[in-house]
Amino acid sequence: MELDLYCTQPHPARIGEIARQAQAAGFAGLWVTEAGHNPYIACALASEAADRLVLGTDVAIAFPRSPMVTAQAAWDLAALSGGRFILGLGTQVKAHLEKRFSVPGDRPAARIREYILALRAIFDAFAKREKLRFEGEFYRFSLLTDFFDPGPIEVADPPIYLAGVNERLVQIAGEVADGFCAHPLNSPKYLTEVVRPSIEEGAKQGGRDSGAVAVVCPVFTIVGDPGPELDRQRDAIRLQIAFYGTTPSYSRIFEVHGRHDMTARLGTALRTGDRAKLAAEVDDELVDAFSVTASWDGLADALLRRFAGLADRIFPYAAPGLDDPEVAERWGAVAAAISAA
């Protein structure tokens, strides 16, 4: 297992320094997400700043970009990084697709499966393994002239990971992707009862070995000695769990824990505008289910116990203070212990 770093707002002016700090601290990789900034630009800048980090998007939103556009970006990043880039894709919820990106939001599972297959066909064409000819329900590609063809690269095709929450997207990852990116709202119970069986089912449908599908997991970490600072961290994570939990399509995660009405309750609390009331819906049992609370000396062991046999790469949802040598050294010790286990 490897410990990576996560950056939710990879501003182009700061991502190089973040990558250098991550590498110096001993993290194995750096994952960036698509929120306020372009994740592909972030990965390009990070690859120049740090020469050993694995770099990945967790996630880049697929549907607003043609598979050809995504393939070109991933191909260039694979070459630029010397094969250290992982293309992590997400579907996004319907409201964002239709209202923020102005693209269709229907049938996301069928669409993303075909999207990944189209990427494979485009990679084959770039590498001169096959002529470009892909005919699907949503995407069709048959033209790639020399002027627009980047040509082969000296490293392997970039791995394609897929993010999701519910069984269908996890099955698709098992069937056609190289890895699965779990949502930050995850637990060992959810990974054991939903993610792993769904990957196995998808791999069976695709005639593949489920062991070839890597799993990447974010984790809410609450680190330190008992006291006000630890309580502050728990309260912040409690509120973050509550905000995530208001998303209707995430209700499955709570159902695994027997909280079938949790999403509805959180939605009701959110509509009041009262953050304290929203956070209060998430009790300590749920905080502990979806996060790890530990001292610095015990953090590595706690993470290993939680994710052993369930994840290949993990990363803290937040790891502030890497510009502080003492904090960076502590994270480095955790990363080294996890990698060596």
Image (cartoon, helix red, strand yellow):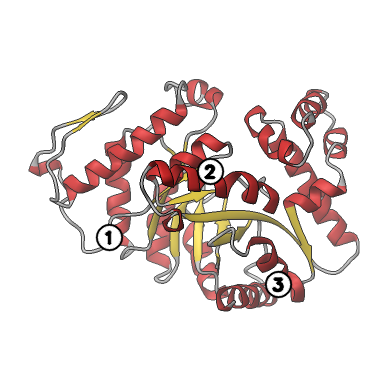
Between disc 1 and disc 2, the foreground one is 2
Residue drawn at point x = 62 percent, y = 77 percent: 337
Of residues 316 and 208, the one drawn nearer to the viewer in this rendering: 208
Q: Is residue 188 left or right of residue 214?
A: right
Which is nearer the eye, 304 or 92? 304
Q: Dot 1: what SS?
A: loop
Res. 156 mark:
1
Residue 277 percent coordinates (x, y): 88, 33
Crowding at dot 3, Cα within 10 Å, few <14 / some 14-19 / many 20+, comes out as: some
- Of the two numbered discs 3 and 2 in the rendering, the one whose residue sits closer to the viewer: 2
> Where does residue 41 sit, x and y in percent of width and height?
40, 50
Task: Determine which residue is flagged by label 2.
Answer: 198
Q: Mark 2 belongs to which amino acid?
A: Ser
Distance between mark 3 and mark 1 Cα atoms: 34 Å
Residue 58 in sight from this viewpoint: no
Helix, strand or loop at label 2? It is helix
Q: Position of residue 73 (x, y in %)?
A: 31, 47
Name the residue beneath numbered marker 3.
Answer: 301
Q: Amino acid at mark 3?
A: Asp
Are there few (<14), some (14-19), or many (20+) residues within 10 Å of tag 2? Answer: many
Question: Is 163 positioned to the left or the right of 288 in the image?
Answer: left
The answer to whether residue 165 is seen in the rendering is: yes
